[in-house]
Image (spheres, rainbow, N blue to C red):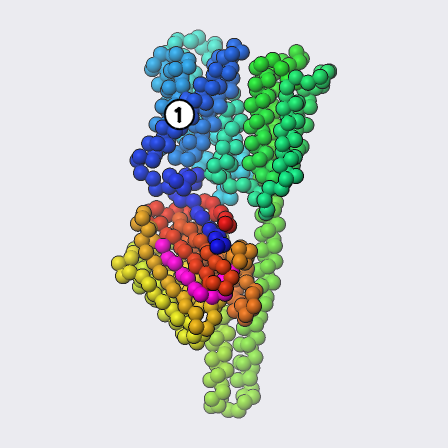
Amino acid sequence: MNVVSAQIAGSDTWCPRALAGAGLSKWALANLATAFLYCGLGWAVSQFFARYGLFPSPIWLPASIAIVAAMIGGARMLPGIFLGSLVANYALFDPPFLEAVAISLGNAAGPVIAVVLIRRLRPTAGLFNRLSGVLTFVGFAVLLHPAITATVGTASLAVVEGLPGASLPGIWIKWWLSDSGGTLFFAPAILLWLNMERESIPRTGNLVWKDTVFWSALFLTAVMLLVPLPLEGAGRWGFPFLMVVPISWIALRISLRAAYTLISFVSLIASAGAVAGFGPFQDAVLGNPLQMVGILVVLLALNSLIIIALVVERREAEEASRFKSMFLASASHDLRTPLNAIIGFAEMMKHETMGPLGSSRYRDYAAHIHDSGEILLDIVNDLLDLSRIESGKHDLDPAFHAARDVAASCMELVQMRADQEGIVLKLEIDPDTQVWADLRSLRQILINLIANAVAFTDRGGVVAVRSDQTGSDGTVFEVSDTGIGMTAEQIEIALQPFGRIRQGEAKDRLGTGLGLPISVRLVKLHGGNLSISSNPGTGTTIRVNLPAADHGAPHQETAVTGH
């Protein structure tokens, strides 16, 4: 079975599917998990650095847990972040209780405030697919979030412990660097591994063994460069910076996730070596080894993120140019054919080629003109609809509708064509089934899907339309046929604008190639998802899941997956 799903993010941009629409109990568990991870990672980091006399930790990795948790649930994750910070601070640093509470409030508020701003400015294509997205993430997650936690924490120390004002700037800078480094070290890798931000340059195939070997070899090289080696001379500290080239290659060749995972490992190894007294950054002329580690990590991280964002923007610009070329090529053909028919038959009528206007054959010509005009009108309407949707100007006016009545009215428009083709249309929807949707858009979705099913089903076949309520009071529509079916590759083509399937007799059934892409985009606007299941020779089933009232939201991200 070939399955392709166009899945749309709901009201929360980064909310995992398991928590979408979750109740209080699941969010409580998510908060407890966040508190456990925050506290556990804080304990591990503090214990490691304390062994080398560094206390508190110069790099606070739990900051990455806090920012990711805030991106998952926003203010709903405040209790978990606060609890994890409170336990970690009170248990590890033994401050006065009120001071620990104040610091933890800052540690919880900082990431949530940053995420609110990131959400407002996040590009639709994703944080790591646009340079503006990368700058937004760095500006708010890596810079602003630590600034808030450092400010609240420093103020708490000043008020509760009465620290002298002269010492506060130094404390603030160390606190800010600690949280900023902890966020940059791990947060992007976590986001990519949790698929909260999609891969910037998706691979077209499976990871080949050469890529795996290269990644492993670079990892071992990084370990060798960052641990004691018989390299002499003051210049040995420069060797780790040469990793910027192969890591950039990994980001482009394999994935940003693979590259940033390697950067996270490099960060850990380099930090461990710096505090333990080994590695290339121990030369006296360099000063603080941790500062060199910070410079290395910032260079590797920002270089990979910015290069990928710029490459993606360039590729999408090239794709947009290709799309325009496809549009012009397709439009020039699809518009010329019906227009030629209109002009030709009109010319014959004008000159009364077949006799006086009273001839019955002119009625046939008039019918041809009418049919050609309808084809032209359908093409123009599809192009206008796609243009409005892509430009974000397609407004929805959702309301409750009887799913059976809507589907029946759509089937009536296709019934004549189905009768001509000898295809049976079946309506299997309970009269009580309700759907929350924009009526015009829903009708367009169903008409496109039913018309496609009829077009690709042979004489004697069956096209069935079903609908039912989902467990969350949403609505699912299912349009199935016994037609020619599609392979996984053909499904991918059909989902692209102007993508048209050529398979045997299907050559005579080509349309504009816009019906299915328009339907997918309209479903996204409702906050729903569309999936296609098909096999050649056995037919196709398309499922449209629409959320309940007020649960839909303008989509943030679209992912197409094949199984």
Magenta region includes residue 479: yes
The x and y percentages for residue 63 are 46, 25
Q: Residue at x 58, y 52 (%)?
A: 320
Task: Estimate how packed mark 1 is, as few (under 14), some (14 to 19) or many (20 or more) residues with alpha carbons within 10 Å.
Answer: some
Residue 118 in the figure: left or right of residue 435 = right
Residue sitting nearer the eye, 47 or 213: 213
Residue 419 against residue 112 in the figure, above or below: below
The x and y percentages for residue 102 are 36, 19
Residue at which label 1 appears: 36
Q: Is residue 123 visible?
A: yes
Magenta region includes residue 204: no
* Residues shaded magenta: 476-486
Residue 336 against residue 189 in the figure, above or below: below
The x and y percentages for residue 473 are 30, 49
Q: Is residue 394 visible?
A: no
Residue 421 in the figure: left or right of residue 288 = left
Residue sitting nearer the eye, 436 or 221: 221
Residue 172 against residue 443 in the figure, above or below: above
Q: Residue at x 47, y 66 (%)?
A: 483
Q: Residue at x 34, y 46 (%)?
A: 551
Q: Residue furthest right?
A: 233
**Numbered disc 1: secondary structure:** helix
Which residue type carries mark 1? Phe
Residue sitting nearer the eye, 475 or 290: 475
Q: Residue furthest left?
A: 432
